[in-house]
Each structure stands twice: as C-alpha cells, then as structure tokens.
C-alpha cells in the first residue's frame, strides 16, 4: 500500500486551544493558508465537527425511514483531481451543497454504520466516498485507500482535537506544523490541539507522551512562531 505522509497543520494560542474565535483575534489573516501551502499537501482532512462548522450545510442529512446500513462497500471515485478535501463522517450525517472546495474534490470517509441512502445521496452529487470500519472509521485503512484510489501522497491533518488525537494515537501522524499565536485563550472546555483520552480512562495506565524532534522554528511578523516537529515513531520489533 502507498504510505501517506501526514502533517498535522494547526494554529493555536500558547495554551494549546484552537477555537478560531480567539486565535483569529491575534493571527495575521492569511498566514495559516500561506504557511500551509509550503507543506506540499495534495489533500487536507477534517472531522465531522469541523466540517459541520465551516464547510457543510447547517442541517444534517436525514435518511429515509428504515434505510438499511451500508455494510461493506467498494470505494466510489466520482472524479480525480489534483487535490482533495477529506471529511471523516462516521455515520454519514453531513449535507453538502457542492462537491469541491476551490478545486479540492470532496471525499467522505464513512463507517459501515452509514446508510445506503446516504451513499446514494453522495453519488447523486458527484462526491467520492470510502467506507472503512464496522462501527467507527478505520483510519489506517482509510489512509491506505486514499493513497491507492486517489494517489494522495501528503495529507494535511487540519481537524479538531478529537480527530487529531485519534490520528496521533493510531501512529498516523508524521509531522506537526504548529502556528503558535502570541496570545492566551484560557477558557476551560475549549478544544485543544490533541484531545480524546479521558483522565479516568483505562488508557491512562499505558499512557506515554508522544516524543517529537524539532525541525525548524520561524518567527512571523505578528510575533507568532511557526514550529515544525517530526513525530518520533516507536521502533519496530
């Protein structure tokens, strides 16, 4: 299988919070996109919450009554493009009014829990999809299929904290590209760069911080820092 190179590209205040309503007050407009363009990505990926907030329609998709679950499905490639927008949407709830974003063709990554009605909906709108995983999205399998069927080589992970954390815990993140904005959010309950492990979870028993190796630091015009790290992967036994 083709191995995608995954770069988590994010902007955050110095306390790691990623709510744009705070970060955008101090960020230089356009810097996030400008620096991201230097990473050479041919696709970007976000989770359902981020896509719902910024890209999808406000109202969710509601399947017809008693529409059966999709079950295992072959990948559907509606079209091929130079770049892609990837939406991780486990149950198939996002509604779309277009099939691309500024030339980035939309690909939905779903689980077998989504309905056949939703797959019909996507095909009718010329939107590609992958069905990976029975009860939740199988992220490693999804990345393999994105490489195999769409030719994606460098994927920019630009999600909320949950999908970022899920990708990191699955060992799928190769680099971190962080624009550290010169400000403090400070509010409790705000999403951070990597979320998802409960302090009371049994996962805590085996918890290990993910080590990083510094690649570069660049000061930006507004005193933000663009910090790039390589993720140090565990040695293969």
Image (cartoon, rainbow, N blue to C red):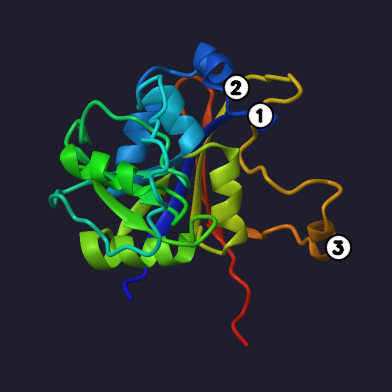
Residue under label 1, please give it: 14
Q: Residue 116 placed where, x, y %?
A: 33, 49
Q: Residue 19 placed where, x, y %?
A: 57, 23
Q: Kindly identify the residue that appears in the image at 22 percent across and 56 percent down.
A: 76
Viewer-proximal residue among 5 and 224? 5
Q: Residues within 10 Å of mark 2 (few under 14, many from 20)?
A: some
Q: Is residue 124 left or right of residue 69?
A: left
* Total marks in image: 3
Q: Kindly identify the residue that appears in the image at 38 percent across and 64 percent down.
A: 72
Residue 97's place in the image compared with 156, above or below, is above
Q: Residue 190 placed where, x, y %?
A: 67, 25
Residue 161's place in the image compared with 222, above or below, is below
Q: Kindly identify the residue that appears in the image at 62 percent across and 79 percent down.
A: 235
Residue under label 3, please give it: 205
Question: First in sequence: mark 1 or mark 3?
Answer: 1
Question: First in sequence: mark 2 or mark 3?
Answer: 2
User: Is the residue under label 2 in contact with that under label 1 (CB below 8 Å)?
Assistant: yes
> Is disc 3 placed on a helix, strand or loop?
helix
Q: Is residue 49 left or right of residue 203?
A: left
> Is disc 1 placed on a helix, strand or loop?
loop
Residue under label 2, please give it: 182
Question: First in sequence: mark 1 or mark 2?
Answer: 1
Query: Alpha carbon of mark 2 to alpha carbon of mark 3: how far?
Result: 35 Å
Residue 195's place in the image compared with 207, above or below, is above
């Amino acid at each position: 299988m083709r191995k995608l190179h995954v770069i988590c590209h994010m902007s955050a205040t110095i306390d790691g919070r990623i709510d744009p309503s705070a970060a955008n007050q101090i960020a230089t407009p356009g810097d996030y996109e400008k620096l991201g363009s230097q990473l050479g990505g041919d696709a970007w990926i976000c989770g359902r919450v981020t896509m719902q907030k910024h890209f999808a329609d406000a109202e969710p998709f509601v399947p017809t009554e008693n529409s059966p679950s999709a079950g295992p499905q072959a990948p559907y490639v509606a079209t091929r493009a130079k770049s892609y927008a990837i939406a991780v949407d486990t149950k198939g709830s996002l509604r779309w009014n277009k099939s691309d974003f500024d030339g980035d063709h939309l690909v939905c990554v779903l689980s077998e829990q989504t309905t056949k009605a939703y797959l019909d909906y996507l095909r009718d709108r010329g939107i590609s999809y992958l069905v990976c995983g029975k009860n939740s999205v199988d992220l490693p399998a999804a990345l393999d299929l994105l490489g195999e069927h769409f030719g994606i080589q460098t994927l920019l992970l630009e999600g909320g904290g949950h999908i970022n954390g899920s990708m990191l815990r699955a060992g799928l993140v190769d680099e971190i590209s962080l624009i550290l904005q010169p400000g403090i959010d400070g509010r409790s309950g705000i999403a951070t760069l990597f979320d998802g492990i409960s302090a009371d979870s049994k996962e805590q028993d085996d918890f290990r911080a993910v080590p990083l190796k510094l690649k570069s630091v660049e000061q930006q015009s507004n005193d933000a820092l663009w910090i790039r790290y390589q993720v140090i992967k565990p040695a293969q036994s």
